[in-house]
Every structure is written in structure tokens, then in C-alpha cells.
Image (cartoon, rainbow, N blue to C red):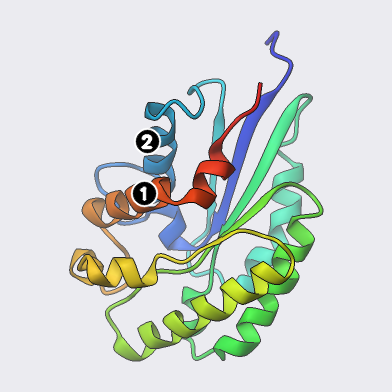
Amino acid sequence: MGREHTDTWFFFGDSITLGVNDTEQPGGFVSRLALLGAASGAYSLPPATFYNLGARRQTLSQIEARFEQEYTARLMPGIRSRLAFCTGTVDLAGGADPVRLSRDVLRLVARAREIAPTLFICPFPVKNETVSAAIATYGLLAEQACSSVNVPCINLYQQLQKDGFVSLLTDAVHPGPAGNALIARLLLDHPAIKTFLTVDD
């Protein structure tokens, strides 16, 4: 009430984005990132608003099919929006081709950037080595796809592997509290997220 604008971030993804196995912070790495950003002085909570729009077991195409409607349903006067996507794990665990999936990323972010500033976050390592290798390949291809349309892309795969992220998974796929905290810290340190979270009053 009485504000000229409300800075708002929309995070779309699957159950990893949703933070289903984070028993200490509902909302997983998204909620943790929101709190870290506020603590760093990037914005104030409130009025800044974060929507975690992760949905369990959803593929990239399912997220693509719903994101505009869910975004539009949350619009209000004075909103200043940013869109973030973290998707691909469900597809690759089901045997999807990383090359084809990266083309889907291109289509997704190209559409999203027409709506609001957009960021793509590549999916994280999992315990299954075959799936994890596909995630690594996909992440590199997604970086190229995003770069081709000037959408920032954050790929934490190698750093997470170095930091022992897989040992922080609770069920071979989903990180627990420590894993989500690690993701949030690494995201906050990334130049692309600093720009994405910065508000200009």
C-alpha cells in the first residue's frame, strides 16, 4: 500500500526448486536465496516478494506450458518482475536427449525474456552417474542456448561436484538443508544473480 512498485521474483521449476526435502527451510534454495539477498542489502523483505513455483515431477515442457498463466495470475499494479527457471532434471532422469532439451530451453527463455528479465539456472548433480553426466552435458548446452538470446545462465554443476554436493542429497536427487544452503550461497556469489536481484529505486 502506498508504494510505487513492488520488486517480485518468480522461480519456476520442479521439486528441487520447490525444496521438498528441506526440513529446515520451506522453499529450499529459493527461500534461502531470498533471505541471503535481503541480508546482503539487495532489497528489503517486505516489500520484495518471492514466489516459489516449483511443482513436483514436472518436465521442462510442463513448466513452459504453465508459467505464463501462473505469472499473469500474480500480477498487480506497480509490480517489477523477474523470472527464473531451473528445469531439466526430470526430463534427463527419464532419458531425454540433452541436445534436444537444450533447444527447448532456448524456446522457453526466448519467450520468457519478452515478458520480464529472465535467468536460467542449470540443474544440479544427482547420485545416478549416468543421469548426472547427462545433466552436465545439458548444462553446457543450456549455457550456449541462453547466451544466444542474451539471457543470463548460471551453471553450478562443477562447483557443486567439487564441494561434495551429492553427499548432501537426501534421496539421490533432492538436497536436504545443507545442500540447499550450499546452492543458495553459490548462487548469491554469482555475478549474474547479483544483477538479477539488484533493485533500482
Q: At which x and y percent is residue 7?
A: 63, 30
Toward the viewer: 10 or 190? Answer: 190
Q: Disc 2, disc 1: CB below 8 Å?
A: yes
* Residue position for label 2: 36
Residue 120 makes an appearance in the image: yes
Residue 170 makes an appearance in the image: no
Taking 47 as reference, is 149 left or right? right
Marker disc for residue 184: 1
Taking 196 as reference, is 76 left or right? right
- Which residue is found at the position 35% from the left and 53% from the top? 186
Furthest residue toward top = 2
Taking 194 as reference, is 175 left or right? left
Q: Real-space Cα distance between discs 2 and 1? A: 8 Å
- Which residue is found at the position 55% from the left and 69% from the top? 58
Q: Amino acid at mark 2?
A: Leu
Please report whichever mark, 2 or 1, sits nearer to the chain's N-terminal start.
2
Q: Secondary structure at mark 1?
A: helix
- Which quarter of the rendering shows the C terminus? top right
Above or below residue 49? Residue 89 is below
Q: Amino acid at mark 1?
A: Ala
